[in-house]
Amino acid sequence: MNSLNRTLGGVGAALALAALSACATQGASPSASTPVVQVKKTTQPILARIFPFIGHKNAAPSVPPKTTPVPQPPVVAALPEKPPAPVLFSTLPDDPSIQLYIDYFQYADHRRFKEWLERSHEYLPYIQQTFREMGLPEDLAYVSLIESGFSARAYSRTGAAGLWQFMRGTGVKYGLKVNWWIDQRRDPILATRSAGQYLKDLHDEFDSWELALAAYNAGEGRVANAVSRVGTKDYWKLRKTRAFSSETRNYVPKMIAAMTIAKDPAKYGFTDLAYHPAVVVRQEEIHRSVEIRALAKAMNMSVSEFLVYNPQFIRWATPPRLPSVTVNVPAEAAEEFAKRLAGLPVSGVNPDVPVYRVESGDSLWSIAHRFHVPLRELVAVNRLKSRHLRLRQKLVIPETGTRGPVRIASRSSYRHVSAGWIDHRIRRGDSLSLLAHHYRTSVREILAKNHLRSSRILRVGDHIMIPSR
């Protein structure tokens, strides 16, 4: 027992000496000549360091602290990058004609160009979006700026129409309906898609946007001939020759100048622009002829307001022979219009009735008197804003005594028929053969009815009888 006490006492003394030695070592400051040895710190207990046999078998195993797993963000597949939008002109040439047109729009034509810029925002967002979806440069939208000033109602002296100034043949070629009832060249939605496809086809043919724009102005045939004759596909070289007309030579510089100003109008003095709000519409399809008044009423707007969105309709009803036609409806009224569309009455238009073509000497009063219709009804049916008639202008003759929906006269009442004959007053340019063709009869029958000889000269103002059919 005494020996055990002495042993424990010796252990205690050894522990005390070790503790004092550790304290002394930590408190002493090393001298300048004594090297400092970095001792690796350990978390092992001090008794285990003095007596290595302690804590190996009998000590409780250490348990690592519990850690809360950090939530990882979900793995998202990388979206494919959209291809960059095509560029219309990679570099602009230092051509004096561009600056010439910039100066012209900025100073000489400032007022009109300002109106174009203010109107541009009606359809510019839609045009740019459509061209992006078609893989075309967005800047092609400014072709409409120099073609029509962004006016869907624009007509030219040569017969071009709409935002993109399509000629009739080109419009029909690219799917637009153009007839007496409707002119879809004036439809801003349909015409924009057709214009995009036309420009795309021109670029595929010439592999140059400058030549494609020149062909848009002059026609692909003339541009192809110019390229073949001069032997180059460089528009800027071609325009220095006489291969192009003056209009085509200046078309691309004019377009670049207009585009340059439109992108930064304040830089060129257009600082007080009041842009029109963007036109946002949805297209609804109808499959029967419906009066314009009924369509406007279904949209809770006047006829004039309806025609702002639908300038393609040029008569009082939608075309009777087309199996379907689209109507542009303001986005906010589209849902309500779709509900009312099924209940709209059919227009009652008779598509088989020919129209009257104005001849020399005609007036609205004489036409109304000839066909026994009220003058005001003749004006209303044809939506005439002026009493002045053009030679060969077409007029629809309403049925006598019409009430309610406007109906067109039947074939028998279209002409002034009385007791089996038609009273025709001779006008300048009339001949027996022309009259026979016009009234679907024969020269022999006209001569017999009027007791005339074939050598008889027709005098302007004379009246002859035409057999009725």
Image: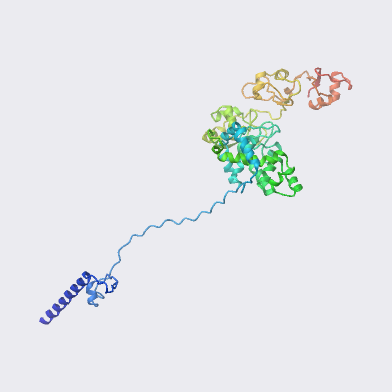
- Asked whether, in this view, residue 428 is left or right of residue 78, the answer is right
Residue 405, given in percent of the width and then of the height, sits at: 62, 24
Outermost residue toward the front in this view: 32
- The image shows residue 78, relative to residue 222, as above or below, that is below
- Asked whether, in this view, residue 428 is left or right of residue 352, the answer is right
- The image shows residue 314, relative to residue 138, as above or below, that is above
The one of 453 and 100 positioned closer to us in this rendering:
100
Colour mapping used in the image: rainbow
Q: Residue at x 57, y 39 (%)?
A: 262
Outermost residue toward the left in this view: 2
Quadrant of the rendered image containing residue 17:
bottom left
Is residue 173 something one can see in this rendering?
Answer: no
- The image shows residue 208, relative to residue 70, as above or below, that is above
- Asked whether, in this view, residue 266 is left or right of residue 156, the answer is left
The one of 11 and 432 positioned closer to us in this rendering:
11
Q: Residue at x 76, y 22 (%)?
A: 360
Q: Residue at x 62, y 42 (%)?
A: 256
Work out which quarter of the rendered image holds the N terminus and state it.
bottom left
Quadrant of the rendered image containing residue 325:
top right
Residue 123, given in percent of the width and then of the height, sits at: 57, 37
Residue 375, given in percent of the width and then of the height, sits at: 67, 18
Outermost residue toward the bottom in this view: 3
Quadrant of the rendered image containing residue 104:
top right
The one of 194 and 199 positioned closer to us in this rendering:
199
Residue 374, given in percent of the width and then of the height, sits at: 67, 18
Work out which quarter of the rendered image holds the C terminus and state it.
top right
- Asked whether, in this view, residue 38 is left or right of residue 99, the answer is left
Is residue 245 something one can see in this rendering?
Answer: yes
- The image shows residue 89, relative to residue 22, as above or below, that is above
How many numbered discs sit on the rendered protein?
Answer: 0
